Image: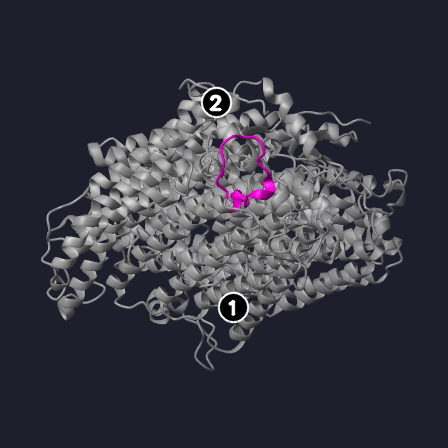
């Protein structure tokens, strides 16, 4: 429950930062915080009491008990999600550089003024 | 062959996305031709799939030979095949165009040493992403392909340079927030059911007790997809994107991208989660938001003086219309929604291509600057007129029939919401008439301002105004399709998929039956028997 | 009696649409271009007349249904009322085309190719409205008519004209969307129903719902029919060239609206239901009010065409009035008035246009003396004006007489009084036109005070007749002559009266023999 | 929910109140939602009992991978991984386009004040010593992904980073090390195509797309799948390493230009560039 509350707080913080922070770079960082919240949320779903990491300890297919290992699926999914998050951040940084070069500011309000 | 088409539908454009830049980097030529061939190929695959599912039997495809819920399944039924056909078709129109936004001097006059092969690769990625969303039956896979399409879209938009980069960044923030909300929602569903498969999910949910977690998950998914679909009041990112993106990008994105998200909404809320109380509730909310979007979008479109911005608001209104129909959810309503999706994609694509060509190539971005267009570019004027009729819903073009079906569907829905939607649809037509006839009046009946480009250009001779040939083709073909969609409305309607009303959850199927059904399919080539 | 299924109605519909393309292609050959127009008009008229025998026999040539959407089909049917309107609009389209040639060329207007193309499409859609067998077909043709007449209204492309064009669109598109809503609603109440004599809506929904539906229809169709208070666009649209005004008033737009009101009252709701829902009397009162209001308003207009426009507002409410009352004679009178008003009003517009083309004058106060130098034109004008007022031996009399009788039949005695008043008002606003033109603005010089003897050289030169080209005076003469013939022999030629009678009889249940009720006026 | 996140500046009046309400509603909904979730770590939760047991119990038997995450990533849900590769490839292409690669190839004098950060002997020596190990470790991570944490992505990132480290340390004035932007792009494209190629190959041998089991590599199916998975991971490795290099090349070029533009100051007013 505490973990979940932490996740929700992280998510709301990220989303709020994206909405409220005036600087685009800060918005981007807030976006990363938000994404991390979702990633942690999935990983929480993988957790099992008393289970080990999802790598087969002993060879031999017999006697593998599902209870003995963490759920590998969320880990897999979150690997992908992390890559997605990193890619998005990379692209966003590229766009930010371009914006900075063109408009000489990353302040959203002054940029929006230029947009109209 | 039939069995492998769904896999090819996504794999071919993905391969193209890597192949085209590779050719561009290695050979410096041939990239454009390769891209065009690939687009045509994808369209052919989509067409073949669309023809194959006409008999009503969906074509399922287990990626990697692993059936759901363990592996990722694709499925092309009438609905997804239609969306795939529309997406691939619109991409064919955008593909030959100049993807770099020359109008605002993108890239500062520099051209990449790879030519525009990179942009063509990104367009193929966008196509692959959208087709992936359409084809998949897996919630997480949908997220992955949503992000592929989003990243590709951000790139294509930002390639416009200048203000387009700001629009692209804001879209990126909104889109990523949408993706995260969606994924968060999927996380809730996963924690409750342990599955990501859209067929398995209702079965598992039927076993689980409905609760707040489920409602939260469904709501998060709905919000995420609504942002992507630019559903009022989550539409904030859309107008700037449509205004500043390069012509080809705007035409393609405006025609299909938001609609694919609406498709995902329909799939998830209308089908997978339909039996769920929270799903039904969210649909009710969507109906009212759709009504709001229809009215607000139409009203704000009137307030615009820039053609592209006006069209952008009109798109918000159209998304509202589609979501109304999706939310009503009856067979007729979904048919109407699909008809409207097709009609609107054709008309809006045509209009945006024309508007982009005029704004980008000739600097004619304001409604008033279009005055006298008919005398200098009569073909474009006719195409724009046809598109405008369709957007308003005047006979005999396609938009009229979609509007008729929509009205009939909302009327049959009954109740206060149905009546309100009915009235909102009529009002939206009137609003559309106001802002579009303003354009038509300028195009046909006003004379160009003294000294303006249109006034100076000669009417005939080699010096007369001309648009790039691929644009002329795109605009003309889309206008012709819009007209044909109206004249042969019955034929179009017949080919639209019937909305498969979901069977009552629980009685429908359980996992063992699902598995045995797969076992039966084991005899077909490429289908592996599970141990 | 089963209706013969045939594709022949399409022969009346397609000429106009098909002709638009060659008209656009012949932009450099004006004579060829107008030839195409006449050919199309002739084909349309011939096709219309060819369906006449079957219709007079009580059967209606019907096309097969063309499915548009599930439960929505395009179908055309040449019943008596439709054929009456179709023949009228075909004849008048031909007359207006001839007149347009003279008018547009003598005033050297531009954009003539687009003009004739739009005109052809408008005529075709009017034909479609006439023959529509169900509401959806009616609606489609109705919207196409709106759109195709829009360029005609905007023809002169001046700022004031553009403003009028906006008003025109605002009214007609608004009405069109409400009509669309009403059509969808009706389709939900009675799926697949076509126009049925006597109506098909009875008992399909609660009274309140049907009343709301009727209001939607009333606004949807009434705006085109220029029923008060939805008449604002009509005087504004007078900025269009005169042949366009003629088209709006006599051939297509307003007439289509009035025709639509008859269809709605007679073929969708039906007179019985109208009375049962307490809709007939309010509608009749609304129409009556419009008649009086527009007549009074016409008197204040100095602009000739605008006065004619208000006259139209008033006259077309006769048709609405007849539809509202719904008794056999009233319906017959209303249906006949479609034809009567068509011939009369087009005469008046042709005359007004000829005057403008010859002298550039468009205000009544400027007309002084013109009657003496344009005798043919003003003779025709006089015929039209008297006919409008309901003078005997002219067609307006027949329609008003029957309307009055119809009103009496259904106990609405005020109708007769209203018609008499309206006739007087008609005279009151048409007479000054003639008076000014013929008796006033004397070419005689104003004499110095006190002198009574005029020297010969002080007399003005003998006024020269300035009748314009035959293209401009022949059409009004033809229309006036046609009106005279129609007044004297209402069944001459295509048999407008028989058609009107048959239409009325079909709605009010054929058992009630119209001729038996008919106790006055010229007999058959 | 009210306005699109990232869209509105919640500055004044009604929008601010609406925004605050929207956030409050979201917070409330989320808290209500999490209270209703299965207990953290519950071995009987649906996520632990429904689909996932098969991955744990059968992965080694079916795919030959002891690392279940790798088995799911590259085999059961190989299609997701293909999409993931496409995502990172899209980001690479995107940066390349947006930052106009041409600028990166143009010779420019580095702005003064930037050079002194490079060329430190300590960093230089460290990089020389570390880089080969980083690259080697990247390959290890790739190959060993089957039985331990690791795989193509991790390896690719490490490999790319190893190449980047040298550039970071030496600056652009140093001798070129590793692939240039064009070669990096080719590498990335080739990686993506190789992944897809394995998928198509499986199709050609009668399987479904990415159905490695049908590949004629000899041995039992698990073994074949193991080999193919390695191939896929290698493809991902190439794609990711290439993309990392592309990203670094373009972003560093972009940063450099920004700095250059700023040092040029008023000479080139903002807005002169597209």
Residue of label 2: D221
Residue of label 1: C365
Residue under mark 1: which chain is it in?
C
Split into 4 quadrants, where in the image is the C terminus of chain D?
bottom left
Which residue range is magenta in the image? A54-74
Where residue C137 sits in the image (x, y, percent)?
65, 40
Based on the picture, tell me whether residue B414 belongs to the magenta stretch: no
Split into 4 quadrants, where in the image is the N terminus of chain D?
bottom right
Q: Is residue A44 left or right of residue D107?
A: right
Where residue D48 sits in the image (x, y, percent)?
61, 45
Give the main secondary structure, helix, strand or loop, of the magenta stretch.
loop
Where residue B91 sits in the image (x, y, percent)?
41, 38
Closest to the observer, D159 or A26: D159
Point 59% across, 25% down: residue: B530
Res. C462 in view: no
Q: Residues within 10 Å of mark 2 (few under 14, many from 20)?
A: some
User: For the residues marked 1 and 2, what is the alpha-carbon distance in whole angstroms?
Assistant: 103 Å
Q: How is the image coloured?
A: one colour
Q: Is residue C374 above or below residue B33?
A: below
Q: Is residue D219 above or below residue B403?
A: above
| Residue contact at pointers 1 and 2, CB within 8 angstroms | no
Where residue B404 sits in the image (x, y, percent)?
63, 45
């Amino acid at each position: 429950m505490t973990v979940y509350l932490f996740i929700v707080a992280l998510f709301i913080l990220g989303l709020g930062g994206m909405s409220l922070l005036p600087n685009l770079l800060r918005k981007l960082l807030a976006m990363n915080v938000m994404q991390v919240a979702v990633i942690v949320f999935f990983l929480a779903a993988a957790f099992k009491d008393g289970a080990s990491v999802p790598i087969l300890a002993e060879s031999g297919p017999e006697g593998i008990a599902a209870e003995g290992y963490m759920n590998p699926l969320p880990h897999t999914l979150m690997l992908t999600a992390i890559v997605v998050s990193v890619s998005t951040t990379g692209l966003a940084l590229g766009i930010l550089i371009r914006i900075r070069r063109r408009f000489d500011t990353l302040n959203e309000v002054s940029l929006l003024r230029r947009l109209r | 062959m039939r069995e492998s088409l769904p896999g090819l539908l996504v794999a071919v454009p993905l391969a193209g996305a890597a192949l085209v830049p590779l050719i561009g980097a290695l050979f410096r030529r041939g990239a454009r031709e390769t891209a065009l061939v690939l687009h045509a190929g994808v369209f052919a695959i989509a067409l073949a799939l669309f023809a194959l599912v006409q008999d009503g039997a969906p074509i399922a495809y287990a990626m990697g030979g692993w059936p759901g819920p363990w592996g990722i399944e694709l499925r092309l039924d009438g609905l997804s095949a239609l969306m795939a056909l529309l997406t691939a078709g619109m991409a064919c129109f955008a593909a030959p165009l100049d993807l770099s936004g020359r109008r605002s001097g993108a890239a500062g006059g520099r051209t990449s040493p790879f030519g525009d092969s990179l942009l063509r690769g990104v367009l193929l990625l966008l196509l692959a992403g959208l087709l992936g969303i359409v084809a998949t039956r897996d919630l997480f896979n949908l997220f992955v392909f949503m992000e592929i399409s989003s990243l590709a879209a951000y790139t294509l938009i930002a390639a416009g340079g200048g203000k387009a980069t700001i629009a692209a960044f804001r879209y990126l923030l909104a889109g990523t927030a949408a993706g995260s909300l969606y994924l968060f929602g999927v996380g809730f569903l996963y924690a409750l059911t342990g599955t990501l498969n859209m067929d398995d999910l209702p079965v598992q949910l039927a076993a689980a007790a409905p609760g707040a977690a489920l409602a939260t998950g469904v709501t998060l998914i709905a919000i995420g997809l609504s942002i992507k679909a630019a559903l009022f009041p989550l539409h904030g990112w859309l107008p700037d994107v449509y205004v500043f993106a390069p012509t080809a990008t705007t035409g393609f994105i405006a025609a299909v991208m938001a609609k694919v998200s609406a498709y995902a909404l329909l799939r998830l809320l209308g089908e997978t989660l339909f039996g769920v109380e929270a799903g039904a509730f969210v649909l009710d909310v969507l109906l009212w938001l759709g009504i709001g979007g229809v009215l607000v979008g139409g009203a704000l479109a009137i307030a615009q003086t820039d053609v592209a911005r006006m069209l952008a608001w009109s798109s918000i209104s159209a998304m509202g219309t589609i979501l109304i129909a999706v939310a009503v959810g009856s067979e007729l309503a979904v048919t109407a929604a699909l008809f409207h999706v097709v009609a609107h994609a054709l008309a809006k694509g045509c209009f945006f291509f024309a508007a982009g060509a005029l704004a980008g190539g000739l600097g004619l971005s304001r409604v008033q600057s279009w005055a006298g267009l008919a005398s200098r570019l009569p073909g474009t004027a006719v195409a724009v007129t046809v598109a405008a009729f369709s957007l308003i819903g005047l006979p005999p073009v396609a938009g009229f029939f979609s509007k008729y079906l929509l009205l009939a569907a909302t009327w049959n829905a009954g109740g206060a919401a149905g009546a309100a939607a009915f009235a909102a649809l009529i009002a939206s037509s009137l609003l559309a008439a106001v802002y579009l006839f303003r354009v038509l009046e300028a195009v046909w009946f006003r004379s160009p301002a003294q000294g303006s480009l249109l006034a100076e250009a000669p009417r005939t001779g080699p010096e007369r105004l001309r648009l790039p040939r691929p644009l002329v083709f795109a605009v003309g073909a889309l206008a012709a399709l819009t007209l044909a969609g109206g004249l042969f409305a019955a034929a179009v309607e017949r080919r639209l998929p019937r909305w498969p009303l979901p069977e009552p959850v629980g009685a429908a199927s359980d996992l063992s039956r699902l598995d045995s059904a797969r076992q039966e399919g084991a005899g077909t080539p490429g289908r592996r028997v599970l141990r | 009696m089963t209706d013969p299924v045939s594709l022949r109605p399409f022969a009346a519909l397609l000429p106009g649409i098909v002709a638009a393309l060659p008209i656009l292609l012949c932009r450099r050959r004006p004579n060829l271009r107008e030839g195409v127009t006449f050919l199309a008009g002739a084909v349309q008229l011939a096709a219309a007349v060819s369906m006449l025998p079957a219709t007079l026999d009580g059967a209606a040539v019907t096309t097969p249904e063309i499915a548009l959407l599930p439960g929505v089909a395009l179908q055309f049917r040449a019943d008596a009322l439709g054929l009456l309107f179709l023949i009228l609009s075909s004849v008048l389209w031909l007359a207006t085309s001839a007149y347009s040639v003279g008018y547009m060329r003598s005033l050297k207007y531009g954009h003539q190719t687009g003009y004739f193309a739009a005109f052809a499409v408008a005529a075709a859609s009017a034909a479609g409205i006439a023959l529509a067998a169900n509401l959806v077909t009616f609606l489609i043709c109705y919207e196409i008519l709106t759109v195709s007449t829009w360029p005609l209204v905007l023809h002169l492309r001046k700022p004031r004209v553009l403003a009028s064009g906006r008003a025109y669109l605002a009214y007609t598109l608004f009405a069109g969307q409400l009509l669309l809503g009403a059509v969808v609603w009706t389709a939900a109440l009675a799926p697949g129903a076509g126009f049925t004599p006597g109506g098909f809506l009875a008992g399909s929904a609660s009274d309140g719902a049907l009343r709301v539906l009727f209001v939607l229809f009333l606004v949807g169709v009434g705006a085109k029919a220029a029923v008060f208070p939805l008449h604002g666009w009509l005087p504004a649209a007078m900025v269009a060239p005169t042949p366009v005004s003629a088209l709006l008033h006599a051939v297509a737009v307003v007439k289509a609206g009035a025709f639509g009101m008859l269809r709605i009252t007679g073929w969708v709701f039906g007179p019985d239901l109208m009375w049962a829902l307490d809709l007939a009397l309010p509608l009749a009162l609304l129409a009556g009010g419009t008649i009086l209001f527009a007549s009074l308003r016409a008197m204040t207009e100095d602009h000739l065409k605008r006065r004619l426009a208000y006259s139209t507002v008033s006259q077309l409410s006769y048709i609405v009035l007849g539809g509202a009352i719904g008794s056999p004679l009233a319906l017959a009178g209303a249906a006949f008035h479609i034809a009567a008003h068509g011939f009369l009003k087009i005469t008046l517009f042709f005359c007004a246009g000829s005057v403008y083309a010859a002298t550039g004058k468009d205000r009544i106060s400027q007309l002084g003396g013109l009657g003496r130098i344009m005798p043919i034109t003003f003779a025709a004008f006089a015929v039209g004006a008297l006919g409008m007022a309901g003078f005997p031996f002219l067609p307006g009399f027949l329609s008003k007489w029957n309307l009055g009788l119809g009103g009496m039949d259904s106990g609405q005695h005020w109708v007769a009084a209203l018609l008499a008043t309206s006739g007087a008002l008609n005279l009151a606003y048409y007479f000054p036109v003639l008076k000014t033109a013929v008796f006033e603005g004397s070419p005689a010089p104003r004499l110095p005070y006190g002198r009574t003897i005029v020297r010969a050289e002080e007399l003005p030169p003998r006024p020269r007749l300035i009748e314009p080209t035959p293209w401009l005076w022949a059409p009004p003469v033809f229309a006036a002559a046609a009106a005279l013939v129609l007044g004297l022999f209402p069944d001459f030629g295509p048999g407008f009266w028989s058609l009107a009678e048959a239409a009325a009889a079909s709605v009010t249940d054929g058992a009630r023999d119209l001729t038996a009720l008919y106790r006055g006026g010229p007999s058959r | 929910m009210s306005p699109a996140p990232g869209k509105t500046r919640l500055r004044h009046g009604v929008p601010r109140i609406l925004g605050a309400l929207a956030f409050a509603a979201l917070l409330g909904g989320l808290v209500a939602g999490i209270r209703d979730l299965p207990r953290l770590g519950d071995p009987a939760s649906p996520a632990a009992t429904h689909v996932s047991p098969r991955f744990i119990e059968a992965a080694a038997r079916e795919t030959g991978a002891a690392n279940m995450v790798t088995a799911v990533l590259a085999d059961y849900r190989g299609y997701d991984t293909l999409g993931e590769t496409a995502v990172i490839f899209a980001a690479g292409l995107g940066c390349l386009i947006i930052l106009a690669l041409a600028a990166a190839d143009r010779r420019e004098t580095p702005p003064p004040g930037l050079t002194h950060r490079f060329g430190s002997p300590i960093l230089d020596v460290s990089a020389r010593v570390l880089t080969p190990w980083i690259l080697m470790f990247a390959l290890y991570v790739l190959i060993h992904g089957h039985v331990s944490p690791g795989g193509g992505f991790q390896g690719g990132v490490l490999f790319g980073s190893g190449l980047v480290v040298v550039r970071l340390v030496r600056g652009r004035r140093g001798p070129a090390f590793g692939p240039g932007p064009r070669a990096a792009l080719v590498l990335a494209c080739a990686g993506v195509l190789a992944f897809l190629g394995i998928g198509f190959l499986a199709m050609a041998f009668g399987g479904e797309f990415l159905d490695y089991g049908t590949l004629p590599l000899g041995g039992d199916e698990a073994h074949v799948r193991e080999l193919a998975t390695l191939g896929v991971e290698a493809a991902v490795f190439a794609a990711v390493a290439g993309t990392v290099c592309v990203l670094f090349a373009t972003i560093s070029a972009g940063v450099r230009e920004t700095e250059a533009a700023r040092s040029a100051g008023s000479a080139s007013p903002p807005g002169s560039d597209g």
